[in-house]
Amino acid sequence: MASPVLSFRVEASLAEKLDQLAAATDRDRQYHLKRALLRYVEAESWHVQAIAAGISDADAGNLTDLSQVKAKWVKREDDCTDGEG
């Protein structure tokens, strides 16, 4: 099965940097573009999944009271400043 072809435009300066990278590593543009796209998609997919999990938790009622969160951070700040005096 043939791989899908993706095509998009970039600034000339970015294409030049990509060509420099390709020449320096003895790899072609496609190699670097595939690696970059894979890393980006993995990172963004994780983020989207984490948001969906958080929404599911919220929909299920698994929430933390805002006053508890604030109290935790106030205590943490107090603990940090206690050692300075």
Image (spheres, helix red, strand yellow):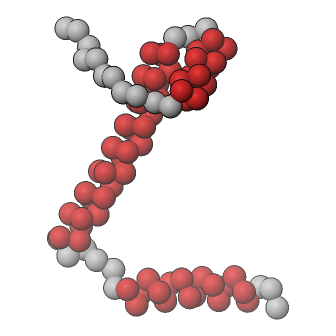
Residue 53 x %, y %: 26, 58
Q: Is residue 71 above or below residue 45?
A: below
Quadrant the N terminus occupies: top left
Residue 4 x %, y %: 25, 17
Q: Is residue 64 above or below residue 35?
A: below
**Residue found 29% across the figure and 51% down from its top:** 49
The answer to whether residue 25 is visible is no
**Residue found 65% across the figure and 89% down from its top:** 78
Quadrant the C terminus occupies: bottom right
Q: Is residue 6 above or below residue 53?
A: above
31 left or right, relative to 54: right
In this view, the residue in front, 50 or 79, is 50
In this view, the residue in front, 19 or 37, is 19
**Residue found 36% across the figure and 51% down from its top:** 47
Residue 36 x %, y %: 47, 29
37 left or right, relative to 76: left
Q: Say which quarter of the image contains residue 43.
A: top left
49 left or right, relative to 18: left
